[in-house]
Image (tube, grey):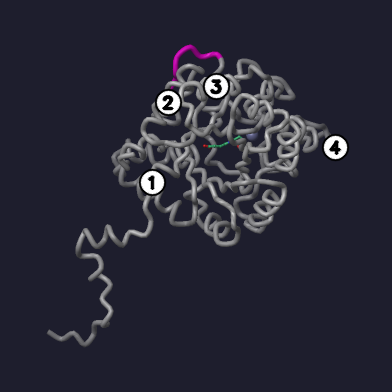
Amino acid sequence: MEHMGYPTRRLRRLRYHPGLRAMLAGVRLSVEELIAPIFIHETLTERREIPTMPGQFQRPVADAAEHAAGLASKGIRAVLVFGIPGSKDPAGTAAWAADGVVQRGIRAIKAAAPALLVIADTCLCEYTDHGHCGPLVELPDGRREVDNEAALAALAATAVAQARAGADVVAPSAMMDGQVKAIRGALDAAGFERTAILSYAVKFASTLYGPFRAAAESAPAFGDRRSYQMDPLSPIQVLAEARADLAEGADIIMVKPAANYLDVIAAVSTSLDAPLAAYHVSGEYAMLKYAAAAGALDEKAAVLEVTAAIKRAGADLIITYFAEALAEWLGG
Ligand code: PBG
Ligand code: ZN
């Protein structure tokens, strides 16, 4: 045999033995880093499957608490809660009501699973009747726009109400300038210095949130979110947004979406010294679910590969609708 043409370094030698492959796997998924979203519905009496998110449900408070306890028993450390209120108004006042749906949900989850970390999504789009992430103001030319300063006061009140109900972490997702500073100040003033902020700092105006908006009943009634969420084709603001939120007091930085934004995850994780959470969003979930249902992909293998890719890119924490399935597959 003539081996002249081969290089001395033969990389396949490291791939022949399955044991050696396993030893050399530098990326290992663990249930410890997963965060499971939960949708809590104020008026439902039984859980209801979300049509565009097979296997995901809107849940009444009691069911959400039971579900959370089940997740905890599988080794999941944290949940991210969203609320769908019974009534909406232009300002989104139900978001910060002491007995609002998320506040009730947090108390019930804490009672059912005391050790579970409860993270509350802090936004107004589920609570406003127009579906935008803050109250509106009419501009001189007649266009309506989210009023940044008015949104700050409402978001701060919401975060304090969530902390008062027992949230360990609040997660502002409205993409208003100054929201982390406003929330940090309000939490501290109310005596919640230990409540952490997981900031949706790097959040793109993505079409991949479509299924979520059906789940959270939060689609904007007019227009879109491009005046507050980032342009997917303009990465120039990525580090600026993340740094601004760290300077305002954010403890953990989120990048969202995740699997289609691995370059952004890598950039943030190599440039900044803060924990990074990546949100594998509803549309990314739906794509995998429907492809698997059609027989195009093996669901378990695909989910493990994609989730590990998010970790490989640099995520420390992964928010994923596959959290429960992963906990089972990883033997959590
Ligand atoms: C609320 C919010 C959204 C998501 C998380 N928080 C929707 C949006 O910004 O329209 C999306 C999550 C997902 O798609 O899974 N601001
Ligand atoms: Zn919102």
| Region in magenta | 43-49
Quadrant position of ligand 2: top right
Residue drawn at x 62%, y 46% as measured from the top left: 251
| Residue type pointed to by label 1 | Ser
Q: Position of residue 225 (x, y in %)?
A: 66, 39
| Residue type pointed to by label 4 | Asp
Q: Is residue 46 a member of the stretch shown in magenta?
A: yes
Looking at the image, residue 253 sits to the left or right of residue 25; the answer is right
Nearer the observer: mark 4 or 2; the answer is 2
Badge 4 local density, few (<14 within 10 Å), some, or many (20+)? few
Q: Please, is residue 60 above or below residue 308 in the view?
A: above
Residue with the mark numbered 4: 141
Looking at the image, is mark 1 or mark 3 earlier in the sequence? 1
Q: Marks 3 and 4: CB-CB under 8 Å? A: no
The circle drawn on residue 69 is: 2
| Residue type pointed to by label 3 | Gly
Looking at the image, is mark 3 or mark 4 earlier in the sequence? 3
Residue with the mark numbered 3: 105
Residue with the mark numbered 1: 30
Q: Please, is residue 196 above or below residue 103 in the view?
A: below
**Which secondary structure, mark 1?**
loop
Q: Marks 4 and 2: CB-CB under 8 Å? A: no
| Residue type pointed to by label 2 | Ala
Residue drawn at x 46%, y 35% as measured from the top left: 36
Q: Please, is residue 59 above or below residue 179 in the view?
A: above
Q: Quadrant of the C terminus?
A: top left
Please name whichever residue, 145 or 325, is drawn nearer the observer in this view of the structure. Answer: 325
Q: Position of residue 10 (x, y in %)?
A: 26, 76
